[in-house]
């Protein structure tokens, strides 16, 4: 499999998982949390899937496509290791869907960042909230969900907050 | 259609066109010319499709994935507006397949660059050579080829050198 093939499969897996996550939270109140904006493609996809949800976006420094820049009052600007703890007073338990795409090509670095962020993300999730993520996460409060058809195990990940 | 959907369709179109181009040149001698390396994904795909062909790669400054960096003697390093004319003495008419992905998100800039590069690329193509390209090209020496099934008109382009 070439790197072009692998990249396409990863994007298809990401899209399938976001679509499944959006279905899974249909009966759950809460906001969406995009953990990393990047070029804004998945932010754009989330707002097309969930036009009636508030979408908060974490980003260190916005460098997205001009049409994919969130309103200023929906941006948590800065390092997530700082902004997520700072958001707890108003965001704890209010997130219905979170999406984490660490986004660098360095898988080891992505996993290390994910491990560091997991305890900062989990308290923000409401009961039954769904987390779609590129790197795998480990937490007693998260259960892995089955992936949509066609998504190979490990290519993307879905979790639900269970406690 | 979200920008994630659009991006996936563009990559699928690119892959389908490269696959078709590789089939079309099966009976034609010649080398491959990758016009722009970027992260190296399509270079990697081309070498998986055409393992027995020499693949020359134009790039201003190599910043690809470590596994997708061409051998130094296959690199035409610098601005294509300089390196393509400089390659004419040894490359004229020797290219069986060329691929151009201008790669920036700025469609107008991509088209302008493509227009500037077209007269520099065409002399390098052998008779019947195929050119796969993201931006459309216009040249009396190129005829547009039908796109593979599933590729919407205008999403990617295939041409053959006819004179």
Image (cartoon, coloured by chain):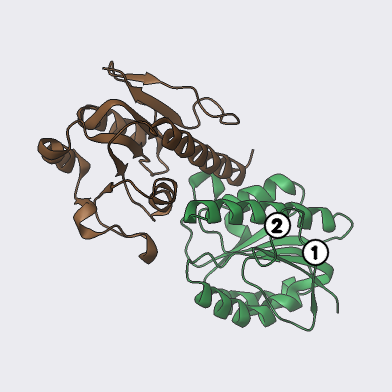
Chain colours: A brown, B green
Q: Is residue A65 left or right of residue B68?
A: left
Chain of the residue under label 1 = B
In the depicted structure, whether residue B145 falls above or below residue A146: below
Do callouts 2 and 1 point to residues on the same chain?
Answer: yes
Camera sees residue B42: yes
Q: Is residue A26 left or right of residue B123?
A: left
- Percent position (x, y) of residue A53? 32, 46
B5 or B42, nearer to the observer: B5
Chain of the residue under label 2 = B
In the depicted structure, whether residue A69 falls above or below residue A129: below
Point 51% across, 58% down: residue:
B38
B100 or B96, nearer to the observer: B100
- Percent position (x, y) of residue B105? 48, 66
- Percent position (x, y) of residue B84? 63, 75
Point 80% across, 62% down: residue:
B30
Residue B151's disc is 2
Q: Quadrant of the C terminus of chain A?
A: top left
In the depicted structure, whether residue B138 falls above or below residue B24: below
Residue B146's disc is 1
Point 48% across, 39% down: residue:
A19
């Amino acid at each position: 499999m070439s790197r072009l093939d692998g990249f396409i499969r990863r994007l298809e897996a990401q899209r399938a998982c976001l679509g499944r996550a959006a279905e899974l939270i249909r009966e759950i109140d809460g906001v969406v949390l995009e953990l990393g904006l990047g070029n804004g493609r998945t932010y754009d996809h989330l707002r097309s899937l969930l036009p009636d949800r508030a979408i908060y976006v974490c980003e260190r420094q916005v460098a997205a496509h001009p049409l994919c820049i969130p309103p200023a009052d929906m941006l948590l600007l800065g390092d997530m290791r700082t902004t997520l703890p700072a958001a707890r007073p108003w965001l704890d338990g209010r997130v219905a869907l979170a999406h984490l795409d660490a986004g660098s090509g360095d898988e080891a670095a992505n996993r290390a960042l994910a491990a560091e962020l997991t305890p900062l993300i989990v308290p923000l999730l409401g009961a039954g909230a769904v987390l779609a993520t590129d790197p795998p996460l480990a937490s007693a409060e998260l259960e892995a969900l089955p992936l949509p058809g066609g998504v190979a195990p490990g290519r993307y990940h879905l979790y639900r907050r269970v406690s």
